[in-house]
Image (spheres, coloured by chain):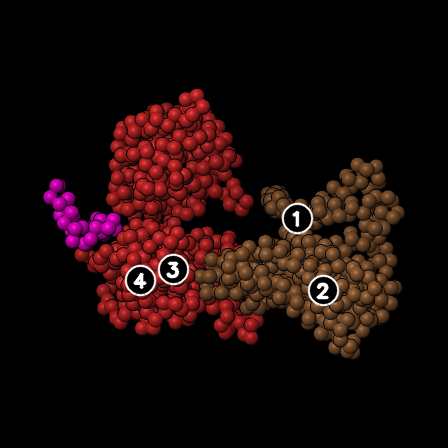
Chain colours: A red, B brown
């Protein structure tokens, strides 16, 4: 053991929550100067483990060694003092503060009674330069991009002299370009002697950046592999426990009539800014139309306007030729629109309802589920049992289980099942696989393609460019609330689409892709 | 499972409340065992006192159901007092104005009190649905509107000799019936007890078995998911507060033309506020509300007896209720404790 230079060792860690053994005798070792990926499905215990290292939870058993010496981390402040820093999945920044103000928050440098922001800003500028972060210390958080905000979080750790950096699913909200930049930054960090723990379920990223990968399944370590000696399929198999297919089996298919016709649609956001601008788009029977875009470019408002959850300011939405711009949510559902919502826990499920109640969320008022205003529990139960079997939804107490008690993957499968069961002409699937493990993703993708193969239309809105590229027959790119181009996924590269997502139009994207090629 | 947990929580709150009451009794130099024995005997020692306990519990059950119904839809109404007053005013007005056979009279009185309460509940419901006015603010304001409405209407149109109360409700318009009064040896018990039980059953059916209940609960648990499903959220909120008001209005009828013989002015009935405690302790379930109102009924009708026999001030009874409310409101603590105990038991096995 002593031959290897480990900076952090978490030895035989166990942590039990009521009803779950989140970590079962887990041992993870991080070498100095390496990037160790921590791979596992949702609920496998990665986050619990990192929370223990960061002082958010106390382990029931096991110990933590830092540079070979045992340490106790009762809270995050101690973790900071020990040189352990964490970039959380959801950034923790004050939006109307400057970069510097955010970074010094909690350990403000003082000159007498006033905060000495100037010297702090100088130090931040120096750090930014050392690690190639390119952050302006005086910029306000609300004015900078998500990628930039993440760098502020990284600077926060560096400012506190962190040696061990934990990244929790860092690429979720980034554009492909920003992901490349982040990887470069991570390499700079390693070059300057830092060590990185990367929590992720994206195999491609592990392959691209990590040195080693520790796989966790159901709270136990399955194994640790040298990334260079393994491939994505092998890691996926370790994570899920069975072989996983990555390619979506999809035969070519002619698209049919127009099912959804959006014309010059304008929608305001909740903050009364123009979220969707003069957007026109058509979706046809028998196709999956992917809508690619960086988070916050009007996708949410567009979907809400399409489904009736938000009023359109102007423009028309036609479903099967009928104007539904001002129709109620229910009228749209009844005329053949189904919606897999972006946020399954906020919109998709009533968490305090049982699964059987959730599975009739849109149809409880129809026979056989109710008659004369009275619910028919038997019919509702039978419906739930059938759907849960068809869509492989696993729950401890079956149809009677509270929706809250299901894992994210099973909740999502239930929603997908419920919406497809309505036999919709148009299925609007928003982030249908967000936060799910490869096994569930594979399953949901298969179901979406099935829907298309049956001649129905799917509008797929996703922030995962891979997903859009793999599944779509056509890709529409949205930027600042407008469609900047519609492309054939077979004729473009991810980089092209990535550029279009930033607002550069198709022809420009092509040119810069060419220019890049020339440089090489 | 959930029912068991709620029962545990409620019992824990009650026991802690009683213990706190015991400490207070000790602090003023009284013997808590003696105090409690008189408190419970005051509520239960003979058939007449049991009748009075039931009569007190009747109104509390109805207002408690009103609160529980609103809470289930995610609305924090505190308008039961005002709705009771309006229900009571409608009942009193009809009782003093019409002359009909008893059963017709009572039917009209009950319907009118429900309607009056429903309107008083629907107004804040509409304001919430249409203008997003918070129901706590509007129900409190409407409580006072009801208070002053009674204050001016009763002396102007329905008084007898005294300026401060209405004329006496005639027997044919009262929920009190001789046979029931006789069974319970002259207590305040009245037909309201059946109204309350019936209401509890109806509400249980509405909440658990009907499309309406499904929608209302969905709105209460997660209004975003309800919107997603195409449920008309504002309409359901207004409807829920309307139904809640109707229940409280009925409670007003059982109080003003059942328990009491006339309507006093200048009083905001405390049952409207106690109803919040009843709903909390009863975990917003109709069965729980009935049990909780029975318990509070015992405390209310026993505290006077305790005071008479021991010199312990009757306010101790109110204090116990208040403490129980605190413990019921912080029920998360008990839920944790319950989960912890369960886990421990499982480990032992």
Q: What is the chain identity of the residue bearing mark 2?
A: B
Real-space CA distance between mark 2 and mark 4, rounded to the nearest whole angstrom:
56 Å
Q: Picture coordinates of residue B238 (x, y %)?
A: 56, 63
* Numbered disc in front, either 3 or 4: 4
Mark 2 to mark 1 CA distance (whole Å): 38 Å
The CA distance from mark 3 to mark 1 is 39 Å
Q: Chain of mark 4?
A: A
Which residue is the site of mark 4?
A265
Q: Quadrant of residue A162?
A: top left
| A285 or A27: nearer the viewer | A285
Relative to A144, say whether B234 is above or below: below
Quadrant where the image shows the C terminus of chain B: top right
Q: Give the foreground label among 1 and 4.
A: 4
Mark 1 lies on a secondary structure that is helix
Which comes sooner in the sequence, label 2 or label 1? 2
Q: Magenta span: helix, strand or loop, mainly?
A: helix
Question: Label 1 neighbourhood size at 10 Å, few (<14), some (14-19), many (20+)?
Answer: many
Residues rendered magenta in the picture: A494-520
**Image quadrant where residue A323 sits:** bottom left
Q: Chain of mark 3?
A: A
The answer to whether A23 appears left or right of A235 in the picture is right
**Residue where numbered disc 1 is placed:** B328
Q: For the point 74% across and 77% down, which residue is it? A: B104
Residue furthest left as drawn:
A518
Q: Write down the residue under mark 3.
A: A304
Q: Nearer the viewer, mark 2 or mark 4?
A: 2
Q: Percent x, y for residue B167?
A: 80, 66
Question: What kind of element bears circle 4?
Answer: strand
- Quadrant of the image for the N terminus of chain B? bottom right
């Amino acid at each position: 053991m002593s031959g290897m230079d480990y900076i952090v060792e978490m030895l035989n860690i166990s942590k039990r929550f009521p009803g779950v053994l989140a970590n079962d005798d887990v041992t993870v070792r991080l070498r100095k100067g390496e990037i160790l990926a921590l791979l596992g499905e949702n609920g496998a215990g990665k986050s619990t483990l990192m929370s223990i290292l960061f002082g958010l939870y106390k382990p029931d058993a096991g110990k933590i060694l830092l540079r070979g010496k045992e340490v106790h981390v009762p809270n995050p402040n101690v973790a900071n003092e020990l040189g352990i820093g964490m970039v959380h999945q959801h950034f923790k920044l004050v939006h109307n503060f400057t970069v510097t103000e955010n970074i010094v928050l909690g350990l403000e440098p003082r000159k007498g009674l006033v905060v000495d922001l100037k010297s702090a800003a100088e130090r931040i500028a120096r750090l930014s330069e050392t690690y190639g972060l390119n952050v302006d210390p005086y910029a306000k958080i609300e004015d900078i991009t998500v990628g930039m905000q993440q760098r502020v979080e990284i600077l926060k750790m560096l400012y506190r002299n962190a040696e061990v950096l934990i990244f929790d699913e860092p690429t979720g909200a980034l554009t492909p370009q920003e992901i490349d930049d982040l990887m470069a930054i991570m390499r700079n960090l390693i070059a300057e002697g830092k060590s990185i723990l990367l929590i992720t379920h994206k195999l491609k990223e592990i392959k691209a950046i990590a040195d080693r990968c520790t796989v966790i399944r159901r709270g136990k370590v399955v194994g640790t592999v040298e990334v260079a000696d393994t491939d994505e399929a092998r890691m996926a198999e370790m994570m899920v426990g069975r072989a996983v297919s990555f390619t979506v089996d999809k035969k070519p298919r002619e698209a049919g009539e127009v099912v959804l016709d959006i014309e010059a649609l304008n929608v305001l956001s909740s903050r009364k800014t123009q979220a969707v601008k003069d957007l026109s788009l058509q979706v046809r029977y028998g196709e999956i139309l992917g809508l690619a875009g960086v988070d916050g470019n009007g996708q949410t408002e567009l979907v809400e306007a399409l489904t009736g959850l938000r009023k359109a300011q102007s423009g028309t939405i036609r479903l099967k030729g009928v104007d539904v711009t001002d129709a109620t949510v229910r009228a749209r559902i009844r005329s053949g629109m189904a919606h897999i919502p972006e946020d399954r826990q906020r919109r998709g499920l009533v968490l305090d309802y049982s699964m059987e109640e959730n599975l009739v969320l849109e149809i409880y008022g129809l026979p056989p589920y109710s008659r004369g205003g009275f619910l028919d529990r038997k019919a509702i139960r039978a419906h739930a049992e059938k759907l849960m079997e068809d869509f492989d939804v696993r729950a401890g107490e079956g149809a009677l289980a509270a929706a809250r008690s299901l894992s994210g993957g099973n909740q999502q499968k239930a929603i997908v099942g419920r919406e497809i069961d309505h036999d919709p002409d148009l299925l609007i699937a928003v982030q249908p696989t967000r936060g799910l493990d490869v096994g569930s993703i594979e399953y949901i993708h298969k179901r979406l393609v099935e829907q298309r193969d049956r001649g129905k239309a799917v509008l797929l809105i996703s922030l995962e460019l891979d997903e859009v590229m793999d599944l779509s027959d056509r890709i529409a790119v949205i930027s600042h609330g407008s469609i900047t181009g519609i492309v054939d996924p077979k004729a473009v590269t991810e980089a092209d689409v990535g550029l279009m997502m930033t607002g550069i139009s198709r022809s420009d994207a092509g040119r810069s892709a060419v220019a890049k090629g020339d440089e090489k | 499972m959930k029912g068991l947990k709620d029962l545990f929580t409620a019992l824990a709150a009650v026991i802690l409340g009683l213990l706190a009451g015991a400490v207070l009794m000790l602090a003023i130099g009284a013997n808590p065992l003696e105090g409690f024995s008189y408190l419970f005997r005051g509520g239960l020692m003979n058939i007449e006192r049991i009748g009075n306990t039931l009569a007190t519990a009747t109104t509390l059950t109805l207002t408690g159901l009103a609160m529980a119904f609103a809470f289930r839809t995610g609305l924090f109404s505190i308008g039961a007092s005002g709705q009771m007053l309006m229900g009571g005013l409608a009942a009193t007005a009809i009782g003093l104005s019409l002359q009909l056979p008893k059963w017709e009279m009572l039917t009209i009185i009950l319907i009118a009190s429900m309607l009056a309460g429903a309107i008083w509940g629907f107004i804040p419901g509409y304001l919430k649905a249409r203008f997003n006015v918070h129901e706590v603010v509007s129900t409190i304001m409407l409580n006072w509107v009801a208070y002053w409405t009674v204050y001016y209407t009763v002396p102007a149109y329905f008084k007898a000799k005294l300026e401060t109360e209405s004329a006496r409700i005639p027997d044919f318009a009262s929920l009190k019936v001789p046979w029931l009064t006789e069974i319970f040896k002259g207590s305040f018990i009245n037909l309201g007890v059946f109204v309350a039980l019936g209401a509890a059953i109806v509400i249980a059916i509405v909440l658990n078995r009907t499309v309406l209940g499904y929608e209302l609960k969905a709105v209460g648990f997660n209004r975003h998911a309800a919107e997603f499903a195409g449920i008309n959220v504002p309409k359901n909120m207004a409807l829920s507060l309307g139904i809640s008001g109707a229940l409280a209005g009925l409670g007003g009828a059982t109080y003003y033309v059942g328990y009491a013989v006339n309507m006093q002015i200048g009083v905001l009935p405390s049952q409207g506020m106690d109803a919040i405690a009843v709903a909390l302790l009863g975990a917003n379930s109709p069965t729980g509300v009935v049990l909780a109102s029975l318990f509070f009924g015992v405390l209310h009708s026993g505290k006077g007896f305790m005071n008479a026999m021991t010199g312990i001030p009757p306010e101790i009874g109110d204090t116990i209720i208040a403490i129980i409310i605190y413990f019921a409101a912080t029920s998360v603590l008990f839920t944790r404790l319950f989960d912890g105990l369960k886990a421990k038991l499982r480990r032992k096995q």
